[in-house]
Image: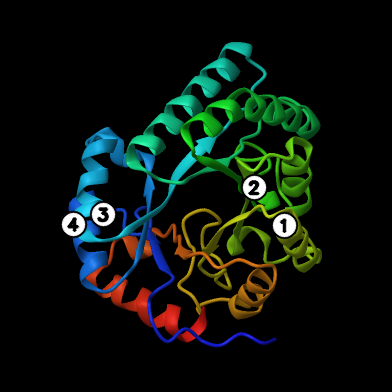
Amino acid sequence: MNVKPFTDLARLCVHTITTRPLDIENAVEKYASLGVRGITVWREVFKTDKPRQVYKIIRRSGLETVSLCRGGFFPSVDKDERERAIADNLSALEEASELEAPLLVLVCGSDPLQSPKTSRNQIREGIEAILPSAGRLGVKLAIEPLHPVYADIRSAINTMKQANDMAGYFNSPWLGVAVDVYHVWWDEALQREIVRCGDNNNLFAFHICDWKVPTGDILFDRGLMGEGCIDLRQIRCWMEEAGFKGFCEVEIFSEIYWKTDQDEFLNKIIRTYLDFA
């Protein structure tokens, strides 16, 4: 492994879901004041603020908008639901464009009332329906494979190979892969598939956190970097060897950390990013 520890925050991005208790203005102010350089916006922010308002808040701070999360959730046994999902993803692309976010991350979805193969076919159909708008608006799409425990309702794309195969089907510069260590750290083919992304120039995003042992809740108990069993620095090494030079995006869903002082939490994020990422 030939990767050095970070000595500054030039590639540190924080997702707003990580500090969920903070409204967008407070999140932006706190990130910027601590030297964080990037921000990823979760769409729930738009329940209270318009995308263009959020864009202005971020731009004043000097932060770089890295991506918008999340689109996807294409599959359903109900045709009307599938059509609504496509319409929602088209809206998400418009939001990303207004936000001037270069990337929309896709959590692709699944329906337990049908086979995973059928859900994957519907994911392909959904991406096909929105890909022309992505190109028109200049917003890339990143397929994020999710851990197999989420294969019931959250995603039928559960491995890097499946994500790469889906991206390869379209062979579009507007479609690639998001690597979230929480979901793929266990995969014996991880290094090979990261290399494959690099070969195809579609390695679009890198999300970091840690898998706590034991994990108290599979969805809401992610750990800070270094708090669990993921070899973050090894995976970053593979990413960089594959040509990735983008942000390391801290994405932590945690009922524990959402209840703590967010200033202290952000300071811990910075310390563990420098020590373990």
- Residue 142 seen in render: yes
**Label 4 or label 3, whichever comes before in sequence order:** 3
Residue at image point 40% right, 45% down: 101
Report the residue marked by disc 2: 176
**Label 1 or label 4, whichever comes before in sequence order:** 4
Question: Is 191 in front, or is 120?
Answer: 191
Residue at image point 25% right, 74% down: 34
What is the number of the mark on residue 141? Answer: none
Against 80, residue 244 (above or below) is below
Q: Quadrant of residue 3?
A: bottom right
**Label 3 or label 1, whichever comes before in sequence order:** 3
Distance, label 4 to label 3, CA atoms, is 10 Å
**Label 4 or label 2, whichever comes before in sequence order:** 4
Q: Nearer the viewer, mark 3 or mark 1?
A: 1
Residue at image point 66% right, 79% down: 234
Q: Residue 172, image x and y in percent?
A: 68, 39
**Label 2 or label 1, whichever comes before in sequence order:** 2
Distance, label 1 to label 4, CA atoms, is 36 Å
Distance, label 3 to label 1, CA atoms, is 35 Å
Callout 1, which amino acid? Cys
Q: Nearer the viewer, mark 3 or mark 2?
A: 2
Report the residue marked by disc 4: 26
Distance, label 2 to label 1, CA atoms, is 8 Å
Report the residue marked by disc 3: 21
SS state under label 1: helix
Report the residue marked by disc 1: 197
Q: Quadrant of residue 224?
A: bottom left
Callout 2, which amino acid? Gly
Question: Is 88 in front, or is 62?
Answer: 62
SS state under label 4: helix
Residue at image point 60% right, 19% down: 82
Callout 4, which amino acid? Asn
